[in-house]
Image (cartoon, grey):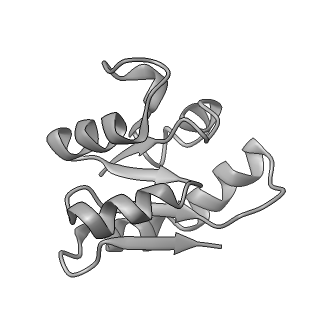
């Protein structure tokens, strides 16, 4: 299970969730032009079998336009700090794993 954090999510989350999500990377750490643009993140995720984790509804539009892969997880959380977001992801680990392994699903919203 490989997660790619969009630029709009703190890079610190990858460190906080590394025990539960060992293949979690931030878009600033991948080999694409920085600052990372949505289309470049999308293509990197598609080519390297990542699921994108974002707050950005633009990835939902890309998903509807281009289809899967990659899959997209949208965090619909507001006013949560980095630690709270990391804790939320860890608490939803089973749901995230199930989503990623299910070929019938392409988007997951986490509240």
1 to 35, vertically: above or below: below
Apparent side of residue 3 relative to residue 80 in the rendered image (left or right): left
Query: Could you say where residue 51 lies in the image, as x and y percent from the top left?
Result: 33, 53
Residues 80 and 43: in front is: 43
**Residue 11, relative to residue 29: is it above or below?**
below
Which percent across, then down, holds residue 84? 76, 53
Residue at (65, 67) in percent of width and height:
76
Where is residue 82 shown, x and y percent of the image?
A: 74, 43
Instruction: Please indicate whether residue 91 sits to the left or right of residue 39 in the image.
Output: right
**Frontmost residue, 30 versus 100:** 30
Quadrant where the C terminus is found in the figure: bottom right
Residue 49 as seen in the image, left or right of residue 40: left
Given residues 9 and 67, the one toward you in this image is 67
Placement of 107 over or under 48, stated as above or below: below
- The mark tally for this picture is 0
**For residue 15, which quarter of the picture?**
top right
Residue at x 49% of width, y 41% of height: 6
């Amino acid at each position: 299970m490989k997660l790619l954090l969009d630029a709009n999510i703190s890079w610190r989350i990858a460190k906080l969730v590394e025990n539960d999500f060992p293949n979690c990377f931030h878009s600033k750490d991948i080999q694409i032009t920085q600052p990372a643009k949505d289309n470049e993140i999308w293509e990197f995720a598609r080519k390297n079998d990542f699921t994108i984790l974002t707050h950005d509804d633009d990835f939902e539009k890309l998903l509807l336009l281009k289809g899967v892969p990659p899959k997209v997880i949208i965090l619909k959380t507001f006013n949560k700090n980095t630690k709270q977001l990391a804790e939320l992801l860890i608490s939803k680990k089973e749901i995230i794993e199930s989503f990623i392994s299910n070929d019938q699903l392409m988007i997951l919203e986490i509240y």
